[in-house]
Image: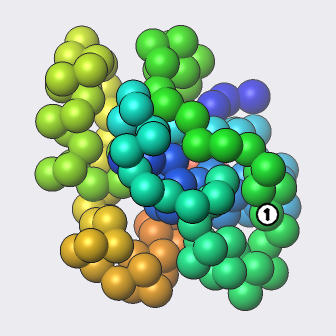
């Protein structure tokens, strides 16, 4: 089974949504991939996030009929082992996340694929999650066709 690592700032909203969405559809289609997600922030106490996962992400997943399996898991910070365990690494927003990767994991920042899905302070959650759903559908389609490297 290959592993996809989704990264965002706090492992609370975009990356968690991506992990749950991707895993749901990968299971439905018997795609031999499994997603996990992590935060680029090393000190998650500064985020101010309440709970284990953003309510907007949870509510959107439920509205799509996707059961949220990892709701009990606390957000987790990225480690070098996580990078080593991943076959594909995707960060939610290049402008936001590439500098963070270059600071904490400089030798790995060029291995990451970057999306352009902004955080809630720059893009409404409904718009961001809709865009993520479309991007993830494309990713799932590409992996099904065995074209994504």
106 or 26, which lies in front? 106
111 or 146, which lies in front? 111
- Mark yes or no: residue 120 visible: yes
49 or 146, which lies in front? 49
State how many labels appear: 1
Please say if 86 is above or below 17: above
* 16 displayed left or right of 138: right
Residue 18 falls in which quadrant of the image? bottom right
At x 83% / y 68%, what residue is drawn?
A: 67
* Quadrant of image for the C terminus: top left
* Quadrant of image for the N terminus: top right
At x 53% / y 12%, what residue is drawn?
A: 81
Where's residue 118, x and y in %? Answer: 28, 66
At x 43% / y 56%, what residue is drawn?
A: 48
* 128 displayed left or right of 116: right
Residue 89 falls in which quadrant of the image? top left
Residue 124 falls in which quadrant of the image? bottom left
Where's residue 66, x and y in %? Answer: 78, 72
* 62 displayed left or right of 103: right
Where's residue 16, x and y in %? Answer: 58, 54
22 or 41, which lies in front? 41
- Mark yes or no: residue 40 visible: no
Crowd class of label 1 (few under 14; some 14 to 19; many from 20; radius 10 Å): some
* 49 displayed left or right of 114: right
At x 23% / y 34%, what residue is drawn?
A: 100
Residue under label 1: 68
């Amino acid at each position: 089974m290959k592993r996809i690592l989704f990264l965002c700032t706090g492992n609370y909203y975009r990356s968690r949504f991506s992990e749950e969405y991707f895993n749901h559809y990968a299971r439905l289609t018997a795609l031999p991939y499994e997603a996990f997600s992590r935060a680029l922030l090393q000190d998650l106490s500064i985020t101010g996030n309440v709970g284990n996962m953003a309510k907007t992400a949870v509510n959107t997943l439920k509205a799509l009929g996707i059961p949220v399996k990892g709701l009990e898991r606390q957000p987790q910070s990225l480690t070098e082992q996580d990078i080593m365990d991943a076959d594909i690494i995707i960060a939610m927003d290049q402008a936001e996340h590439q500098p963070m990767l270059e600071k904490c994991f400089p030798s790995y920042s060029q291995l990451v694929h970057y999306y352009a899905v902004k955080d809630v302070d720059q893009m409404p959650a409904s718009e961001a999650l809709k865009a993520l759903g479309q991007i993830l559908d494309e990713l799932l389609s590409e992996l099904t066709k065995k074209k994504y490297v």
